[in-house]
Image: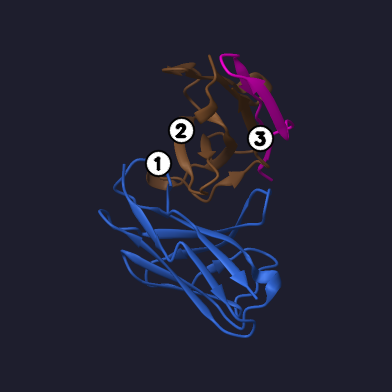
Chain colours: A brown, B blue
Amino acid sequence: AQKVTQAQTEISVVEKEDVTLDCVYETRDTTYYLFWYKQPPSGELVFLIRRNSFDEQNEISGRYSWNFQKSTSSFNFTITASQVVDSAVYFCALSEAYYGGATNKLIFGTGTLLAVQP
Amino acid sequence: GAVVSQHPSWVICKSGTSVKIECRSLDFQATTMFWYRQFPKQSLMLMATSNEGSKATYEQGVEKDKFLINHASLTLSTLTVTSAHPEDSSFYICSARSWGLSTEAFFGQGTRLTVV
């Protein structure tokens, strides 16, 4: 069965601190996708990144970076020099790959509430 | 990215009434749509998956007669909460996928349902 674990329920940091959000997943599939979404207080889900299981390269996008390690089944997310606007709930999600490359349903972790204090 | 529009953003209804939530893909054809439910401070739980033109597949524990899903066209899916009760109050969010697009699932803005 597929499962996503985000052990950190809440994290509070002071602005400009770096923060890492952990994500550990379980799947029997050899081909799958991993995602991170941001959910601000307004509720909409903001897509941040997708990574397929064959691409273990780390990725950096501005202040965001992701570390994917298949050996430990982890897909951690780091925010560098955090800002108050980063305050939100962050979800890690897993999806099996479907034929044609499209994703199937998403299995979400329980989310991590990040509070960035000014 | 592709745009998914969900309507209404919020709704308050009386207990016992039915509420319909619409999910539209605005600039692509959604062959599959997913409906999720999120209780306060909890994660998103998949309720059902619907493929255009066929019956929805419900997750275990989700009452198909209470949560009616229709996906009659490639751009519209609806979720109807029938005979709503206060315990149905939740945040409902849809997502849509198309074979022709990249592998992200595109999400609507969500609908906050409050049953009084």
State the residue in front, A81 or A60: A81
Name the amino acid type tagged 1: Thr
Whether discs 3 and 1 lie on one chain: the answer is no
Q: Nearer the viewer, mark 3 or mark 1?
A: 3
- CA separation, marks 1 and 2? 8 Å
What number of labels is visible? 3
Q: What chain is tagged by disc 3?
A: A
Q: Is residue B6 left or right of residue B92?
A: left
Name above or below for residue B82 compared with residue A67. below
Instruction: Say the numbered circle drawn on residue A112.
Output: 3
State the residue in front, B21 or B102: B21
According to the image, label 1 marks what residue?
Answer: B103
- CA separation, marks 2 and 3? 18 Å
Q: Residues within 10 Å of mark 1 (few under 14, many from 20)?
A: many
Q: Are marks 1 and 2 in contact (CB under 8 Å)?
A: yes
Name above or below for residue B28 compared with residue A29. below
Instruction: Say the numbered circle drawn on residue A50.
Output: 2
Q: Nearer the viewer, mark 2 or mark 3?
A: 3
